[in-house]
Image: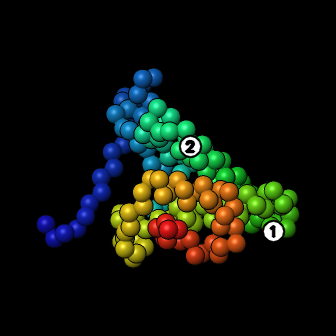
Amino acid sequence: MDGTKVTFLIVDTSGDAVDEELPYGPLDTLWHFDMSLASRGLFPAIDPVQSVSVILEDIHTNEEHMKVQQEAKKVIRRYRELSYIVNQRGIERLSDQDRMMFERGKRLEMYLTQPFYVAEPFTEKKGEWVSPDQLLDDVNQILNGYYDQKDVDSLKFIGSFS
């Protein structure tokens, strides 16, 4: 083989593998790829709100991890809702609370463009390893406003803040 990497995607179009006990069939994780992210060059273009994994269910994670994960999903979801208003009417139409949520959501979305090894061909950035603890700490700091003054574009493919 010439070194070309191949990615496989398995799709069960019949739905036979799904039941009440295994709602995702034999799969532990389902990634929802987001064309909006990909079209803006934000890789890996995986939607963190719609993607699911049994690994991230509360039986496998601690309370702090679940809290940060749920808050991050909430902020990204609200950011996306507010994006429509901002694009149509401008950011000045938002309340101070919504403006803060919008700005933090924008920073969180940009931070999640991690320089993953799988994204190297798309980003032309060398992949980096960020530990789960560091990732949670960074996301928590974004959610708590620690990086509100940081330029959004400086968060793209940064790895971690440390």
**Residue at left offset 41%, top offset 42%:** 29
Residue 6, by quadrant, is bottom left
Q: Position of residue 145 (x, y in %)?
A: 69, 61
Along the viewing direction, whichever of 77 and 115 lies nearer the viewer: 115
Mark earlier in primary sequence (1, 2): 2
Residue 156 — which label? none
Residue 142, by quadrant, is bottom right
Farthest residue toward the front? 162
**Residue at left offset 16%, top offset 71%:** 2
- As helix, strand or loop, the secondary structure at mark 1 comes to loop
User: Total marks drawn?
Assistant: 2
Q: Would you say 11 lies left or right of 93 here?
A: left
Q: Amino acid under label 1?
A: Gly
Q: Position of residue 72 (x, y in %)?
A: 61, 51
Q: Position of residue 140 (x, y in %)?
A: 60, 55
Task: Look at the image and tell me whether residue 80 can be seen.
Answer: no
**Residue at left offset 34%, top offset 33%:** 26
Residue 22 vertical position relative to residue 60 in the rendered view, above or below: above
Along the viewing direction, whichever of 13 and 36 lies nearer the viewer: 36
Local crowd size for mark 1, using a 10 Å CA cut-off: few (<14), some (14–19), many (≥20): few
**Residue at left offset 60%, top offset 43%:** 67
Residue 64 — which label? 2
Which residue position is annotated with label 1? 90
- Label 1–label 2 contact, CB within 8 A: no
Local crowd size for mark 2, using a 10 Å CA cut-off: few (<14), some (14–19), many (≥20): few
Q: Amino acid under label 2?
A: Glu
Disc 1 versus disc 2: distance between alpha carbons?
35 Å
Q: Would you say 71 lies left or right of 15 here?
A: right
- As helix, strand or loop, the secondary structure at mark 2 comes to helix
